[in-house]
Amino acid sequence: MNGAQSLVATLRASGIDTCLANPGTSEMHFVAALDQSAGLRCVLGLQENVVTGMADGYWRIAGRPAATLLHCGPGLANGLANLHNARRAHSGIVNIVGDQATWHRPHDPPLTADTEGLARTVSGWVKTSMTAADVGRDAAAAVQAARSAGGQIATLILPSDASWDDGGVVAQPLAPSPGLPPDALAIDTAAKALRSGAPTLLLLAGQAVRAHGQQLAWRIAHATGAHLTADYLAPCVERGRGRLQLERVPYSTDLAIERLARFRHIVLVGAKAPVGFFAYPGKPSTQFPADAQLHVLARPDQDAIAALRALAEALHAPEAAMPDPGPRPQAASGAPTPEKLAQTVAALMPDDAIVSDESVSYGRGFYQHTHAAPPHDWLHLVGGAIGAGLPVATGAAIAAGGRRRVISLQADGSAMYTLQSLWTQAREGLPCTTVLLNNRKYAILQGEYRGVGATPGPTALRMLDLGSPDLDWVRLAEGMGVEAARATTMEQCADLMSRSFGRTGPFLIDLAV
């Protein structure tokens, strides 16, 4: 058995059943070993940032890591933007990165890079296997690390000789480190704040915005009068009928400061204290009041469900029925607007859908119009590195085994970063509906210009414009093997959306907004 064969067998034994790949020469023995092992689904991405984004989306839905296969340091570098997003989302991923043979590397061949250095910028665990005998053991440790600390990125670097040499040994799976239990003092401190009668906010993220966490948080809020809000950067929020009508902390620093101004206590449950995405002249970095007291009930690497349960018990909070969101919206008509699109998505989406939201500036008000939709999961861009929406949607569809419709609400500018995702959706026959929000501009950057007090001139405005020539999204999608059509009204959009939901494969709606 060579090192590559021991790697594949160890990954399978450790529960990895999906490999998302963009391989090169250094990884050929790993690719060959995949042919010799049943039970590992291999999915090709045409660029590494597609591969790493798919792995992020896979974790958010499956709750277990996929493996990626990346080609040397430059291939890893191509995937860093979506690994940055995945790190912010606490997504568990096992990166397998090929590298130069140990005896060839000292000659400084062209693809030589500081692969470990690149990996450490996004990884919680990094290791280079130096011999074939090390590979199985290191692979088991990588999977263990990816599944620990609430989910993290583990990067295993595999020199080609460690892959092709004989001497590989299959390692036994290693149990992940258990989640850190809630802290008794933190629970007592939060309970005192909630009993104080002062305006108190529970800021929720991670498992706290999944269905079970919401039920526990609602018990606490119902018993104490506390307010509940989701972190703007929550990776996956379970939403729709039967879930809470949560809103997020606004993106805008001014709106966030206004929203949080009344709270004297803020209890953080899997969330960080709210800060602005960027600095703006004359505005604070933090969005909460200077005199508010922050209380950490659970860090992202702690068990938020156990912490909420313990807090509910400390407060003797009884069970409480989830509030009714009201009637389901009707599909909208007329010219497209953000509100009408949100209503139409809520009106038409099938049960248990997944929404991958990279609508950027267009979609900041989507939540208030979609509370009465059927139960669904809503995936957010967490790290701010655009180009995540389409790969995350693709990985989520793979994780769901093709049984759940995935709806991408996708800005046009950021879609161009990882357009190749559509090809993978077509090849794998994934049930993905992309609503491409085509305004032919980087609208968010026009808003940021105003935010920092700059005055754009003709040259600056040309850098924010996606016209001249216009991007033809129908032809771009069809060139990737995805059927597509253009919509200029909400009636057309609703018709195309409904038809796409009855398909087994992908479809793109080029919505002029």
Image: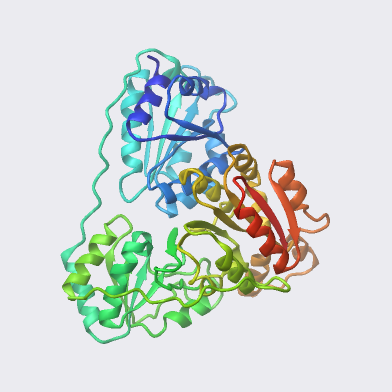
Q: Is residue 198 left or right of residue 105?
A: left
Asked if 390 appears above or below 278 in the picture, the reply is above
Q: Which residue is drawn at 39% across and 68% down?
A: 242
Q: Picture coordinates of residue 499 (x, y %)?
A: 66, 55
Query: Residue drawn 33% across and 80% down?
Result: 292
In the image, residue 234 lies at what x, y percent? 43, 62
User: Quick one: quadrant of the N terminus?
Assistant: top left
Q: Residue 26: where, in percent of width, then height?
A: 53, 23
Front residue (pair 152, 471)? 471
Q: Determine the residue positioned at 71% across, 68% down.
A: 491
445 is higher (above) or lower (below) than 59: below
Q: Which residue is drawn at 65% across and 40% down?
A: 423
Q: Can residue 283 be seen in this view?
A: no
Furthest residue in direction right, as rendered: 468
Dividing the picture into quadrants, the one containing residue 167 is top left
| Residue 97, image x, y percentages | 48, 32
Query: Which corner quadrant of the image does residue 51 belong to?
Result: top right
Task: Name the side, left or right, on which 457 lies relative to 74.
Answer: right
Which image quarter holds the C terminus? bottom right
Q: Is residue 198 left or right of residue 424?
A: left
Q: Is residue 396 visible?
A: yes
168 sits to left or right of 80? left
- Near-viewer residue (390 or 455): 390
